[in-house]
Image (cartoon, rainbow, N blue to C red):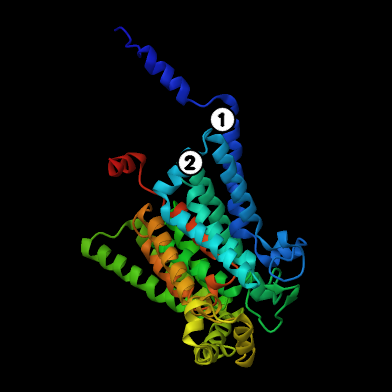
Amino acid sequence: MRSIRQPAYARRHDAAARPGPVLRVLLRLESAALSGWALLLVGVSGGLLWVLGLNYEGITGSAASKIHPATYLAVILIGWSLMRAGNPVIPVAGALNRRPASVLLAACGVLLLALIAARGGAGLAGSIDTFVLAGLVPILLLDRDAATLGRLETVFHLVMLANALLGLFELASGQRFFPYRFDGVAFESDTRSAALQGHPLANATMTACYILALAKGGGRLAPMTRAAMIGLQLVALVTFGGRSATVTTLVLGGSVGLVALNRTLRTGRVPLAAAACACFALTLLPVLVAVLATAGFFDTLLDRFVSDGGSAQARVDMLTVFDAIPFRQLLLAPDLLQVNTLRRIYGLEWGIENSVISAVLYHGILVTGVLVIAVGLYLAEIARDCRRGVWLPILAFVILVNTFEGLAGKTTLLAKFALMLIVLFPAAAAADRERRAA
């Protein structure tokens, strides 16, 4: 049979679309840089940066050290993508068209920075790491190939594995390696594990959302590996001291488990491998309970719920702060000096344990409303381009981020969470995306 040759114009189009050797090398370097960026974002906390000589979470030190290294690298990678496109207008227009909520969130972060600077407030870098970095994550990962997303997923799993193991080791040894520090001073009375995420409650939030993401089928882990990772993360969750995270995980995760069990029993078919694994797990359960009891795990769990260190009272006191501030100031922008004075009076030096309330007290109702809308649209935009199951970790995140200062302070938590959703719940196949676009 005679071979059917492509027309000359088709061959020229294929040759133009195929990247040259130099570009292929640059794309591999870009993919490696993305993996390094993910490692920086998820695995490097303020406590670790202090060990490396950077005062990220304090007041003293250079202004450049107050911005997370992952933010710098994200900006560099965005700049490289603009250069690689040849015409920077094309990727900018693509981001505005396909990631409008991400662009809006990043713009809100810049405007918040300008507002804080105009009022003479502290924490300018907080708006950059909290909102601008988060807005750049979906734009940076736009149209990435499956191999790149797979490498980022592997990095995320490995960091969460190391985080859980380090948290358990800190519980057993009584030593915290990278605790949250303010100008180098750690809170010695806080004995919760810090691991790689720094702040214990941010750590608990990420761990809880990761557990629920795995429970809903996120990622490409094998069933046995997935079950082992969920079990390990559940045990590590207690060491981070997040009571709200523990309860939320058990309630939402238990609901997912009951629904899955009911579905399996209704079909009348139980896989032989699953039955064997369940029997094996039941035989190991008494041994695991004995080991955890010997290590003092259950004492730690009970202590988290019996003694809250005044956390419940702090949530009551933070509402009384509103009584001393006129509504007009709350609407526009409360006096920062007055807010800080009221915090000291009511013993809220560790923070106002609700993201929305803290933002209202520092930035006013109007600014907070815009930020809440921007974050809501941002999460909805990410969920729209992810596969099914993504809403359960989003629900947990919304609940937990409002049990402590969360997004009201300087944190990379929202950016980490966005990365987790994108790599664990990647969008459908390219053909499906093209069909929806058509």
Distance Cα–Cα, label 2 vs label 1: 19 Å
Image position, residue 403 (x, y; %):
49, 79
Q: Is residue 293 above or below residue 16?
A: below
User: 161 and 365: which one is in front?
Assistant: 365
**At 61% across and 72% down in the image, what residue appears?**
119
Dot 2 amino acid type: Pro
* Left or right of 160 in this view: 373: left
User: 8 and 97: which one is in front?
Assistant: 97
Which mark, by number, is residue 53? none
Q: In which quarter of the image is residue 122?
A: bottom right
The answer to the question of whether label 2 and label 1 lie on touching residues, with beta carbons closer than 8 A, is: no
Image position, residue 28 (x, y; %):
58, 36
Q: Quadrant of residue 374?
A: bottom left
Quadrant of the drawing holding the C terminus: top left
Dot 1 amino acid type: Arg
Q: Is mark 2 on a helix, strand or loop?
A: helix
Q: Is residue 15 visible?
A: yes
User: 183 and 390: which one is in front?
Assistant: 183
Q: What element carries label 1?
A: helix
Image position, residue 209 (x, y; %):
46, 66
**At 44% across and 79% down in the image, what residue appears?**
247
Which mark, by number, is residue 91? 2
Mark 2: few, some, or many residues within 10 Å (few <14, many ≥20)?
some
* Left or right of 20 in this view: 13: left
User: 176 and 108: which one is in front?
Assistant: 108
The residue under label 1 is: 24
Mark 1: few, some, or many residues within 10 Å (few <14, many ≥20)?
few
**At 76% across and 72% down in the image, what residue appears?**
184
